[in-house]
């Protein structure tokens, strides 16, 4: 960078070449993998697509089982590079939350015949801008039969995804599904809960989906949930009516953890859940969740603590 005096400054920007980036990444990756060859944490490193290619080509990745690429600048073009990499074939956990994914990359991965990441058990895609149709395509893909945990929260997940979840038979091992802040209407929800996948889930996070009383009735009254242990229903705008149905649901007798804070029910609804004759196996029951009183935290840093109909909520 050169600076000229006299009030006029000139900056010479140097964009490193691919070879220079490769050398720099080798310096970064070698000590990380020497410390723990099974885990590679690269969150918040400003990683873009070129960096993904370099990382995937690095010869020392063969033992890595957990790859954390959250909070970076990875977009759709990089997804096939990741999932089709021979060096990442053994990956079991992949974290891609808070990136620049919008959908086409996920569609490409779902349809690819070159997927090497067949051992993947945990996939986190939350906090991107994935379209509903792209997530639906992924749920219909047969490329990930060993997946056990999937987080698609805080995307544009809606009716197409719900219908695909009701239809899919491609995830025989899926036990945990996180769908926080989705956009599913009542009819699509009915199709979702009718699917065979619901009988194998052990944990379902449906936080902040605006189910209201009618949606909650559909969800908890479905003759499913044979394996369900953990159910998260905070911020869903249901009142006493929904709470009573929840407390009387014969399908949810196996629950051990239930979260229903920041909803609209009062004492009557709370008693219906707390004194339920069916939900007797609960080890954790959250009926009320506090919201920090600091305006900065409530309105900006922690918008998830607001009710979903709050005008300040995002």
Image (cartoon, rainbow, N blue to C red):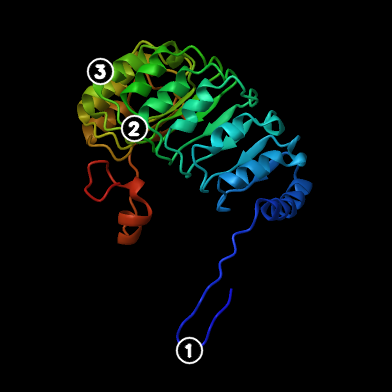
At 49% from the left edge and 22% from the top edge, which residue is drawn?
202
In the image, residue 259 sits, relative to residue 119, either above or below, namely below
Q: Please give the residue where the numbered disc 3 appears in the rendered image.
A: 187
Q: Please give the residue where the numbered disc 2 appears in the rendered image.
A: 182
Where residue 195 sits, quadrant-wise, is top left
Image location (x, y in percent) of residue 148 = 56, 24
Task: Pick whichever, 123 or 305, lies toward us.
Answer: 123
Q: On the rendered image, what quadrant is the N terminus found in?
A: bottom right
In the image, residue 97 sits, relative to residue 176, either above or below, namely below
**Residue that sits furthest to the right in the current view:** 34
> Please, what secondary structure does the residue beneath circle 2 have?
loop
Badge 1 density bin: few <14, some 14–19, many ≥20, Cα 10 Å: few
> Please, what secondary structure does the residue beneath circle 1 have?
loop
Q: Earlier in the sequence, mark 3 or mark 2?
A: 2
The alpha-carbon separation of the residues under discs 1 and 3 comes to: 69 Å
Relative to 151, 286 lies left or right: left
> Please, what secondary structure does the residue beneath circle 3 have?
helix
């Amino acid at each position: 960078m050169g600076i000229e005096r006299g009030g006029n400054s000139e900056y010479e920007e140097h964009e490193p070449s691919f070879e220079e980036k490769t050398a720099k990444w080798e310096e970064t990756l070698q000590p990380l993998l020497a410390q723990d060859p099974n885990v590679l944490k690269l969150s918040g490193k400003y990683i873009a697509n070129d960096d993904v290619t370099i990382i995937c080509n690095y010869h020392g990745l063969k033992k890595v089982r957990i790859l954390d690429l959250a909070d970076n600048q990875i977009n759709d073009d990089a997804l096939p590079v990741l999932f089709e990499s021979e060096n990442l074939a053994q990956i079991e956990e992949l974290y891609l939350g808070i990136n620049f994914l919008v959908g086409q990359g996920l569609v490409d991965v779902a349809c690819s015949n070159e997927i090497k990441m067949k051992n993947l058990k945990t996939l986190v895609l939350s906090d991107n801008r994935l379209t509903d149709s792209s997530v639906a395509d992924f749920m219909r893909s047969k490329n990930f039969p060993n997946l056990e945990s999937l987080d698609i929260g805080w995307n544009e997940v809606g009716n197409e995804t719900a219908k695909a979840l009701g239809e899919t038979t491609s995830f025989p091992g899926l036990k945990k599904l996180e769908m926080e802040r989705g956009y599913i209407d009542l009819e699509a929800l009915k199709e979702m809960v009718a699917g065979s996948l619901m009988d194998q889930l052990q944990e379902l996070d449906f936080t902040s989906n605006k189910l209201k009383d009618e949606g909650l009735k559909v969800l908890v009254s479905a003759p499913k949930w044979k394996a369900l242990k953990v159910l998260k229903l905070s911020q869903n705008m249901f009142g006493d009516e929904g709470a009573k149905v929840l407390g009387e649901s014969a399908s949810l007798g196996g629950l051990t953890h239930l979260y229903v804070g920041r909803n609209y029910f009062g004492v009557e609804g709370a008693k219906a859940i707390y004194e339920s004759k069916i939900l007797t196996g609960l080890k954790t029951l959250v009926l009320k969740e506090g919201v920090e009183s600091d305006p900065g935290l409530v309105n900006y840093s922690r918008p998830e603590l607001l009710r979903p109909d709050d005008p300040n909520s995002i």
